[in-house]
């Protein structure tokens, strides 16, 4: 029986359907994809892959402000392609993290601050966490009807220009019987509701414009011989509750005051999170699905709480993706040393664990026969270290974590303002020293 992960990775490595600029680009693409495929499956590749998480670096390094990058999609595209040409990584994201500020402005989005508005032009966008939805307004409503909750309660709370959507009736009560429909449509005639719908249309136009440029850019990246960084994204159910609805403090309180409802909502989020990852990854025909883990780090909760609230629903999402042949890639933000034994409980050769901070030797000892490990370069060294310090760091990382394969060299953070010579060293010295 063919393993679905192997099948998915082999299809990716085949580069079927990609129109390359020449045969050299095709060979380079297949070589890079094979390198990543091997390291995921814990085979020994030809060398250690290096996949820098550039963040806003391509724009700052090419003379743009962050404001220009998030408002001018074509400038961001051009800068990203220059960075690709200069640094030649094994995979590349493109300008996907230069999020479209005009979309957020169209909705009056409250959960981000973007450069050139509430923060200076050269700053990276900032996430604004809050308890946007109180517990009494969240759990029962979400469990009863997630879509209605998102439309009529969540969006009006986090988008100032969508506040009038809270005035419309639930769709489940509004349609299907002509007498009901006659009055239910009246809500869409309210001028404020119509303005909210126009704001959504404007946001949709900006989203389509941005996605169109990203899709064209993705074709350019692949045609020049570089695999894309990932095919889609998903999330840990606990993080979805804490990041978007209840806030860090709110969801922590919920573990004590309403654990059953928290567990019930997270269970409802499992299939949603699986589908969230699969839909994009299937559309992009790419096996890797990224996760950003925000609230599971050491110190955020006790080991017992991690093993009750955080890991079980996350593992269910991961297993749902693995069963479909996709590769979860977990960016474990914060320190994760105390979590290593727990998160080792996953099928062999199916995942990438990308650490910000961890005991690297311990991570290799516990996880080395189970998952591919990504990261290892401190942001502080990229920002302020010397070239020699970078080389020493890479050498030690490969000696400790890279033995026998299973390592992707990267930083555990987006290194927006790193020294260009250090980024260059990360790529070039890994290619030199990391040959097996």
Image (tube, helix red, strand yellow):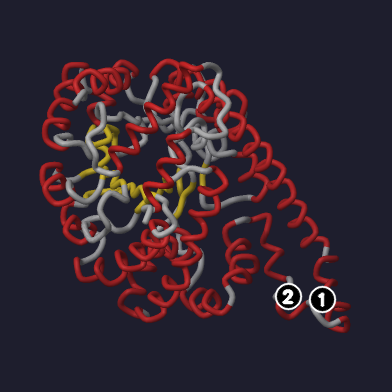
Q: Is residue 273 above or below residue 407?
A: below
Tell me: 181 left or right of 26: right
Quadrant that contains the C terminus: top left
Quarter occupied by residue 9: top left
Q: Where residue 404 appears, x then y in whole percent? A: 16, 36
Quarter occupied by residue 84: top left
Q: From the image, tell me which residue sits under label 1.
A: 184
Q: Where residue 240 appears, x then y in whole percent? A: 44, 61
Q: Earlier in the sequence, mark 1 or mark 2?
A: 2
Q: CA distance from mark 1 to mark 2?
A: 7 Å
Tell me: 128 left or right of 154: left
Tell me: 361 left or right of 97: left
* Picture residue at 37% right of the left edge, 68% below the top: 251
**Number of callouts in the render?**
2
Name the residue nearer the viewer: 365 or 239.
365
Q: Which secondary structure, mark 1?
A: helix
Quadrant that contains the N terminus: bottom left
* Picture residue at 68% right of the left edge, 41% below the top: 208
Q: From the image, tell me which residue sits under label 2.
A: 169
């Amino acid at each position: 029986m063919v393993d679905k992960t192997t099948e998915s990775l082999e299809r990716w490595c085949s580069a079927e359907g990609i129109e390359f600029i020449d045969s050299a680009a095709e060979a380079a693409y297949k070589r890079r994809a094979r390198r990543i495929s091997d390291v995921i499956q814990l085979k020994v590749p030809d060398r250690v892959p290096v996949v820098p998480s550039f963040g806003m670096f391509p724009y700052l390094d090419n003379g743009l402000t962050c404001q220009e990058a998030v408002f001018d999609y074509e400038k961001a595209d051009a800068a990203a392609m220059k960075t690709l040409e200069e640094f030649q990584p094994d995979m590349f994201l493109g300008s996907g993290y230069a999020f479209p500020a005009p979309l957020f402005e169209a909705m009056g989005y409250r959960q981000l601050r973007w450069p050139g508005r509430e923060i200076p032009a050269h700053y990276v966008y900032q996430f604004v966490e809050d308890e946007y939805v109180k517990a009494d307004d969240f759990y029962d409503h979400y469990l009863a009807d997630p879509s209605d909750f998102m439309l009529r309660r969540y969006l009006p709370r986090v988008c100032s220009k969508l506040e009038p959507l809270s005035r419309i009736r639930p769709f489940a009560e509004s349609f299907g019987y002509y007498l009901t429909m006659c009055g239910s449509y009246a809500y869409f005639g309210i001028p404020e509701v119509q303005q909210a719908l126009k704001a959504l249309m404007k946001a949709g136009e900006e989203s389509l414009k941005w996605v169109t440029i990203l899709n064209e850019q993705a074709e350019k990246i692949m045609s020049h011989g570089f695999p894309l960084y990932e095919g889609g994204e998903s999330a840990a159910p606990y993080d979805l509750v804490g990041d978007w609805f209840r806030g860090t403090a709110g969801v922590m309180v919920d573990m004590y005051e309403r654990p059953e409802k928290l567990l019930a909502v997270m269970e409802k989020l499992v299939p949603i999170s699986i589908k969230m990852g699969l839909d994009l990854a299937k559309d992009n025909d790419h096996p890797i699905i990224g996760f950003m883990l925000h609230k599971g780090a050491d110190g955020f909760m006790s080991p017992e709480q991690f093993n009750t609230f955080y890991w079980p629903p996350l593992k269910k999402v991961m297993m749902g993706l693995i069963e479909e042949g996709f590769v979860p890639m977990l960016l474990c933000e914060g320190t994760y040393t105390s979590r290593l034994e727990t998160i080792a409980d996953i099928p062999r050769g199916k995942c990438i664990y990308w650490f910000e901070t961890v005991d690297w030797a311990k991570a290799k000892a516990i996880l080395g026969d189970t998952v591919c490990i990504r990261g290892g370069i401190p942001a502080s060294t990229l920002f302020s270290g010397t070239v020699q310090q970078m080389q020493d760091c890479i050498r030690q990382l490969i000696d400790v974590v890279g033995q026998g394969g299973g390592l992707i060299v990267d930083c555990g953070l987006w290194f927006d303002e790193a020294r260009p010579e250090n980024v260059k060293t990360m790529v070039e010295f890994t290619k030199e020293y990391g040959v097996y």
